Image: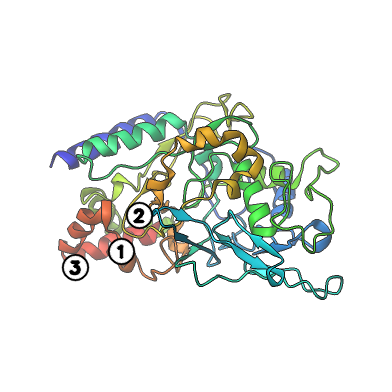
Amino acid sequence: MRILIAAVALSFALAFTAAQFADAPTGFDNKTNGMVDDATHQADQTKFDETEQLSDGLGPLYNAQSCRECHQNPVSGAASQVTELRVGHLGPDGHFRTPDIPIAHGAEVISGRSLVNDRAICPNAAFPAEEIQERVPETETIRTFRISVNLLGDGFVEAIPDQTLIELSKQQCKSSHRKICGQVLYVPIVEAPGQMGVGRFGWKDVHTSLLSFAADAYLNEMGVTSRLQPDEVTKLCNTVSEPNDTPGPDGLSDIDHFARFIRATKAPARDAELAKSAAANKGQALFDKIGCATCHVATLTTAPAGTKINGGTFTIPAALGSVTFHPYGDFLMHDVGTGDGILQATPEHYGRRVFQRMAGYLSKQDFESSRNKIRTAPLWGVRMRPRLMHDGASLTFVDAIARHQGEASHVTQKFEKLKRSEQEEIIEFLKSL
């Protein structure tokens, strides 16, 4: 009972605070949230949707040819069914180790990455004898797929004060008597050398900055280097000078356009009709009552306009400042029994130069304890996803709920004890998101 009272009190406090500010604009129309004008937003979307070619620096190892390829349902920037493959193994000391993957008949070994790329540009006409396709060695016994995440509304997520997430973690732990304790991870801000912030993007909270996130994806998913990630995974078959991503006539690189596009997107909209239904509203009350809202937090508020974030490299504009939004997520790391066992490989996500410069700071982060944790999946727009959870292996809402164990086991048990009609009301609520 005390857990419920504390959770309700926290929700009330957040709602009271949120009531003082305007709600974030929502919609699946690829229109701007007001941060930039529509013409600028459309130009940024063109960059986001653009298919990369070999001449642009695609590869040599890659998964996709555009940002949109992995973020497109129902519009550019949303989630999709596309998955990526990550593997590794435990060393003799019980710690996670990234794989060593030989390519080019053993001429080179790819190391320091958990990601295994599905595609390669060679062999091709220019390099008919170079075979660089990655394959998973038998030694890598930890294997998982991760489904692509939604990016719509992430400008508001980026603008959440670090302290908000820190306090949310503390409150969860206190109110649940340590049954639910979201983990906060401090991660490098690649564009602000030496600076760190609270991670919130990606299934392992690897980034706090959307520019850092964009540069990471550009290199690791498309093989395109940038000023933030200037080093190729392999030089084999590579013919384009580094960095591949260079400033255009406007002075902006592709990663700048990607980040600005994401920052200017509207948040995912609810199903307007279903959200008004009696069943969905009863379901939301039950969702809160049994404890789902402890992690799937309904409402958060951004920092005021003019606040400098990301190590001082980005100033929150008026459109993103002091705005409330409804992600149904806490953006913290939790062990709910579905963790994939993969430890984030810091050189992979931040680049070897940043890793070498910040190795001391990174060693103080308890990354090892997050190996079997996953960021809470924000539920906004979840009705658009036929494959659920981090690996896309749950195909119904009931399947996904049943998989919640670990920190969420007592919440799952409460769901299972509900009447069938009450369970269906919770599902109706989820269908409205």
| Residues at marks 1 and 2 touching, judged by CB atoms closer than 8 Å | no
- Check residue 420 in the rendering and tell me which mark sits there, or answer none: 3
Q: Nearer the viewer, residue 253 or 125?
A: 125
Residue ID for mark 2: 276
Left or right relative to 25: residue 121: right
- Mark 1 to mark 2 CA distance (whole Å): 29 Å
x, y percent for residue 243: 78, 47
Task: Write the residue at 23% across / 56% down.
Answer: 409
Q: Nearer the viewer, mark 1 or mark 2?
A: 1
Tell me the residue at 81%/38% (across/down). Answer: 251
Query: Compared to 288, does 98 lie above or below?
Result: below
Between 233 and 319, the residue placed more toward the observer is: 233
> Disc 3 to disc 2, how far (Cα)?
21 Å
Residue 82 appears left or right of 63: left
Mark 3 residue type = Arg
Q: Residues within 10 Å of mark 3 (few under 14, many from 20)?
A: few
Looking at the rendered structure, the secondary structure element under dot 2 is: loop
- Mark 2 is surrounded, within 10 Å at the Cα level, by few (under 14), some (14 to 19) or many (20 or more) other residues, namely few
Residue 403, numbered label: 1
* Label total for image: 3
Does residue 15 appear in this view?
no
The residue shown at (45%, 67%) is 141
